[in-house]
């Protein structure tokens, strides 16, 4: 039962990934694209966590944490650039 729920969650996350990617490529402004990028990374982190559970590998969670930290730094840098420049 648990694996079925995680498979359903992965399917929903993939649908959300496609819709966020659409907003990333078709966003009307730079701010919309930055927000879509942030959403894409959050969805990717959740997919890595689901894969970690299904594969029973704890090391994937470490990868997800590092990816989240790098994504956070990237969004902060781009936001500072858009606000007033580096």
Image (cartoon, helix red, strand yellow):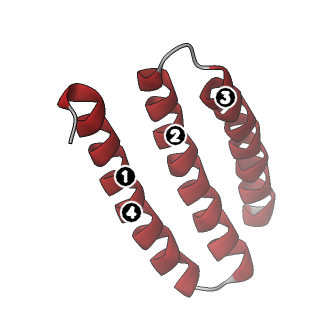
Q: Which residue is mark 2?
A: 37
Q: Which residue is mark 1?
A: 74
Compute the Cα span from label 4 to label 2. Answer: 12 Å
Q: Are marks 4 and 3 in contact (CB under 8 Å)?
A: no
Compute the Cα span from label 1 to label 2. Answer: 10 Å
Badge 4 density bin: few <14, some 14–19, many ≥20, Cα 10 Å? few
The earlier-in-sequence mark between 2 and 3 is 3
Compute the Cα span from label 1 to label 4. Answer: 6 Å
Write the residue at 57% across / 79% down: 60
Q: x, y percentage for residue 30?
A: 45, 24
The earlier-in-sequence mark between 1 and 2 is 2
Q: Is residue 3 above or below residue 11?
A: below
Residue 70: mark in rendering:
4
Compute the Cα span from label 2 to label 3. Answer: 10 Å
Q: Which residue is mark 3?
A: 25
Q: How many marks?
A: 4
Q: Are marks 1 and 2 in contact (CB under 8 Å)?
A: yes
Q: Are marks 1 and 4 in contact (CB under 8 Å)?
A: yes
């Amino acid at each position: 039962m648990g694996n079925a729920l995680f498979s359903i969650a992965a399917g929903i996350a993939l649908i959300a990934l496609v819709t966020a990617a659409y907003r990333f490529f078709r966003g009307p402004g730079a701010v919309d694209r930055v927000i879509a990028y942030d959403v894409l990374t959050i969805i990717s982190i959740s997919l890595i966590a689901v894969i970690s559970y299904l594969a029973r590998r704890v090391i994937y969670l470490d990868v997800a944490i590092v990816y989240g930290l790098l994504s956070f730094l990237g969004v902060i840098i781009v936001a500072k650039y858009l606000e007033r420049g580096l």
